[in-house]
Image (cartoon, grey):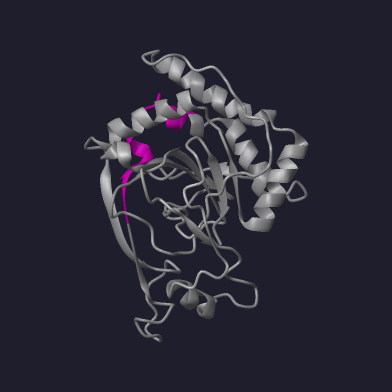
Amino acid sequence: SIRNGFIIARLVLCVSRCGSVNSFAFDALGTLYPVQRRSFSCRRFSCPGKGGGMDQTGSVAADAAAAALSYSAEEIACLRDEYGRKGWVAIRDFVPPALCETLIEEATALLESDAAFYSTDAHTVYQESEDTKFSCEHPRNALQQSSKRIVDYARLSDQSPLRLLYLQPALLALVQRIVSPETESKSLYLSDCPFNAAYYNMYREGDGLGWHFDKGEFGVNLVLQNPVSGGNFEFHHNTLTATDTWAFDKVERILSGDSCGVVSSDGLVGAGSLVIFNGR
């Protein structure tokens, strides 16, 4: 059932003004969603009771995003350092339980409706067409299976709490401060794609994402509901390097089940966590 499934909201931010429709088409299985081990104070804010109306729901989303501004320069530096060293960082309790439940309620209603669609895909680890110079079993061509249920951005109402959260400038500013060093002039933008700017993902029994490299430089996920079992993310950091841009040997070992260098979340990331991960 949906209540026993794994629900994630994907938030797509781009390094150019014209976000490609396919830039961030997949989440990253093969990407760890860890518990933030640093002792940061939790940002708590009021949430109106259920049935408070769309205006109040929008206010909650705005308050949640505005909380991102309260992180100190020292805290941001720690988050950025961890992201750089490990390839990911998780901000626990980014949204409190009450707001998380509001988002789950919206996701559940949409996922149970005709607004949702079931996505299945057989793809290579590199998310590129198969290369006929290699065999089907070669790491370059080995197919991975991915499936999930999706409600895309176009199906969210103007007063959707997820849409309102995504549009908050404070959220964009927080992610930029973590993934883009202040010494660089690189700016982040909201996606122009009408479908994948922000969307709900639902994984039920038998669903999952095969090993792959993300096409984007980074990804942002908001964990809303953990499954009763499963939903385990794995990550191998710095698989590709400047001198080994395909890393066939490493990929072959990972696909064969070699866990050396692979880290697993083992269900440690709780609901309400904002997870930022390096897509490459």
Residue 84 placement (x, y as % from top left)? 68, 55
What is the tally of numbered marks visible in this picture? 0
Q: Nearer the viewer, residue 158 or 251?
A: 251
Residue 196 placement (x, y as % from top left)? 41, 45
Residue at 75 percent across and 46 percent down: it is 182
Apparent side of residue 84 relative to residue 20 in the rendered image (left or right): right
Residue 233 placement (x, y as % from top left)? 46, 55
Task: Say whether residue 153 is magenta.
Answer: yes
Q: Nearer the viewer, residue 21 or 94?
A: 94
**Quadrant of the image containing the C terminus:** bottom right
**Quadrant of the image containing the N terminus:** top left
Looking at this view, name the residue that lies furthest to the left. Answer: 114
Q: Is residue 269 something that shows in the picture?
A: yes
Residue at 44 percent across and 72 percent down: it is 257
Task: Say whether residue 248 is magenta.
Answer: no
Residue at 35 percent across and 28 percent down: it is 105
Residue at 31 percent across and 33 percent down: it is 108
Say if 179 sits above or below 122 in the image: above
When asked about the image quadrant of residue 79, the answer is top right
Q: Is residue 17 something that shows in the picture?
A: no
Q: Nearer the viewer, residue 145 or 193?
A: 145
Q: Which residues are magenta?
A: 147-164
Residue 264 placement (x, y as % from top left)? 51, 57
Apparent side of residue 90 relative to residue 210 in the rendered image (left or right): right
